Structure formats: C-alpha cells, structure tokens
Image (tube, grey):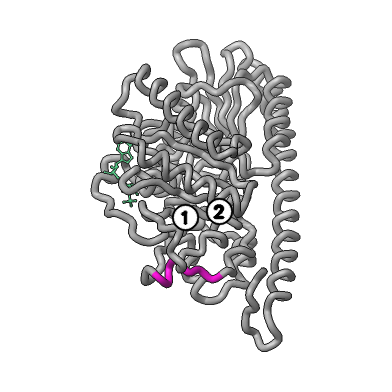
Amino acid sequence: MTPEGREKYPEEEEALAYYDDDDLDAFADGDASCGGGEGEVLAFSDSFSSEVKPRILLMGLRRSGKSSIQKVVFHKMSPNETLFLESTNKICREDVSNSSFVSFQIWDFPGQIDFFDPTFDYEMIFRGTGALIFVIDSQDDYVEALSRLHLTVTRAYKVNPDINFEVFIHKVDGLSDDHKIEKQRDIHKRANDDLADAGLERIHLSFYLTSIYDHSIFEAFSKVVQKLIPQLPTLENLLNIFISNSGIEKAFLFDVVSKIYIATDSSPVDMQTYEVCCDMIDVVIDISCIYGLTGDAAGSPYDKESMAIIHLNNTTVMYLKEVTKFLALVCFLREESFERKGLIDYNFHCFKKAIEEVFDVRLKVQKSRKLLSQRRWSKLTTPNGTQAQPH
Ligand SMILES: Nc1nc2c(ncn2[C@@H]2O[C@H](COP(=O)(O)OP(=O)(O)OP(=O)(O)O)[C@@H](O)[C@H]2O)c(=O)[nH]1
C-alpha cells in the first residue's frame, strides 16, 4: 500500500482499461494529474463521462483553501506545509481508490473558472459529478464567493440535478464559537435567498464549518463521501444491529488510510469522539510501524491481525478491529460491557461477514455498471475506431 493507500485494485485496472493512453497516464497509480496547456486541460475528452467512479469537484475562489483540503485529507500533508502551496492554475484530477467504498475522483479547480470560455466543457464535467464542494474562505469577505457559488450551483444544477451541493465554510480556526455560528447562519441565509430569488429553492445546499487545523475537515469529507455510497443504509443497519447486540455505545466504520468514516450507527456523532477514534487509528498504525513490521518489504502496518483495545480513565473502553484490508471498526463501550468480550468478538465475526457480503455485492454492481458503460461507449465508437460525438 502506498502511504496514501492509493494502490491500484484489479477492478480499478479493469475500469481504466478502456481509456486511451493519455487518460491512463492521468490515473496511473493514483497519481494526481494536472493536465498540459490551458486549452488542452479545459477541453477534456468525453471518455471521462463513461467512468464509473463518482467525481467530487473542489471549487471556490482563489486561495480559499481547496488544494490544502485535498493535500491534508488525502496526502497526509501537515496543515502548516500548505502555507507553501502554489496557486493551482489547471484542473488537477486525482483518483482516490482506498477501497471499494472509498473510490472516487477528485478534481481540484483553479480559483477562477470562466464558464463562458468555450474550451471549458462544463457540461461534460458536471454530467459525471457526484458532489460539488464549494469552498468559502470565512476569514475573507465572502460577497464575491457567494455570487460565484450561486453561478456555479445554478449552472451545475441545470446540467445535472442529481449533484450533491456541499458548501465548506472554511478556515474557521481563526473564529470564536459564536462567530462561527453567526457566519454559518449568514452564509446559509444569503446563499438560500439568492436561490429563492432565482426561483430555485429546490436546490439543496449542505453547509459545514471546516478547518485543516482540526478534524472538522475529515468529518465534513466523511459526510460528503457517505452520500456517494449507495449501500450506506445497509452499513448503518449492520452497525446498529452490531452495537445493540454487543452493549456498545458508539461504532464507526473507518477508511483507515484517509480517516474518513464511511458509516456510523444512528446515534449522534460528536466531534470529540470522532477525534479520539482518529487518534486511535494513528496510534495503532504508528506502533505497528515501529514494532509490527517483519522487515519484509511487502509487510503492511495494517492487516488481518490488526486490533487494539484502549482503556480510558473514565471507565470507557475503545476497541478497534480490522474489517477489510482498508476498513476498521472503532467502538466505544463501558468497562462492564467489555467484560462480555467473547460475545462482542462473536458479534464482530458476524458483522465482518456481512460487510464482506455487502462489499461483494458492491463489486458486482460496479462491474455490471462498467460493462454497461463500456457497451454504451463502444456504440459511440465508429467502426474505424474513431470516437463519435456523444449526444
Ligand atoms: N487558517 C487557515 N488557513 C488555511 C486553511 N486551509 C488552507 N489555508 C491556507 O490558505 C492558503 C491558500 O490555500 P490553497 O489550498 O492554496 O488555496 P486554493 O483554493 O487551492 O487556491 P488556488 O489554487 O489559488 O485556487 C494557504 O496559505 C493555506 O495554508 C484553514 O483551514 N485555515
């Protein structure tokens, strides 16, 4: 596994098999790709529209923090290092394939997109988009950002009404709690008023207060990604059944590499609990790197044997166990419930089996979708191998 965990999966390789070489280069080993010249970059080949992975777009004004978010969440960059990031002047695409559940492309856009530029094929881009994250710098005057948000959302909605519109009110680390709430209320009101004035109240915007200097950015990304997992209700049900049978108070299913939680039970999530879970994953991976690796190059700090139990000093126990190659279950429970560890282990075994089945079904669905889109794509290809213009 690479440090970012973007190992190429067999199904991913298959999924890429029908792209032309240039497109393949863009995705090779999950490398981020920022295309060549401006015109070239903005005029994409429409072959991307046949991609089966959902696309997440990161948009917003210059210096709002888009690239920093991507680097901190998916590249483990430390927040302070983002001070040295250069401005993005081309669209950067990255394939994130940590697991079958966390599998999407992120497109980081330069600050100023000109929707009237004929080389910017925004229809093609929005058509294959699952989520559009619009980043607003809360430490700056946000009047311009709000009008940009309105323009972007209305354009995108016209092309694809199924996009999830997610607004990150970003860089809130510099604000007091009262100030944060006040900003969120004001931005929420103005953005929705603009939509109402345009007769577009049906467009739903979700708002998140985020910062790369704490876990809020991971939590917000978790929620964005969860909405793109069609099996989410099943995963949540399985977690509910598991915790109620085992006397567990809270459980998260984590993507270990990104520390995005892809599902949790139906009880509310509080930020502190989420942060402690992230810390526990870090501790497990760090200790495993120091003491757990066999010296064999193929060894991974996270494998089938990975598990940890931490007794906190408030009679709470934390329990982490490997579910799949990239997923971990992290739970909170009382000391007295932990005395029935045998029962918890047995229930965990059943839970893990069920997750594997959901995973298999997801793979099958992805494969058949891919076959379908391959067929659709080959229909668009003329007999001499050139591509017909998609309608
Ligand atoms: N205080 C604070 N600063 C942040 C945060 N996120 C990003 N920044 C800073 O904001 C500045 C701009 O970040 P970038 O990630 O380059 O912004 P961008 O939106 O990608 O900028 P363009 O590429 O020009 O569109 C950098 O100096 C970051 O360190 C945050 O959560 N809090």
Crowd band around label 2 with a 10 angstrom C-alpha radius: few (<14), some (14–19), many (20+): many
Q: Is residue 127 left or right of residue 187?
A: right
Would you identify the image quadrant in which residue 324 lies?
Answer: top right
* Cα–Cα span, label 2 and label 1: 7 Å
Depth check: 18 or 180 in front?
180
The region drawn magenta spans: 39-45
First in sequence: mark 2 vs mark 1: 2
Q: Is residue 74 left or right of residue 344?
A: left
Q: Name the spot of residue 156 as percent of width and height, x first.
A: 55, 50
Q: Which residue is mark 2?
A: 55
Residue with the most extreme left position: 84
Q: Is residue 292 visible?
A: yes
**Residue drawn at the location 60% of the way across and 22% of the way down:** 250
Vertical comparison of 307 with 342: above or below: below
Vertical comparison of 135 with 275: above or below: below
Would you identify the image quadrant in which residue 168 lies?
Answer: top left
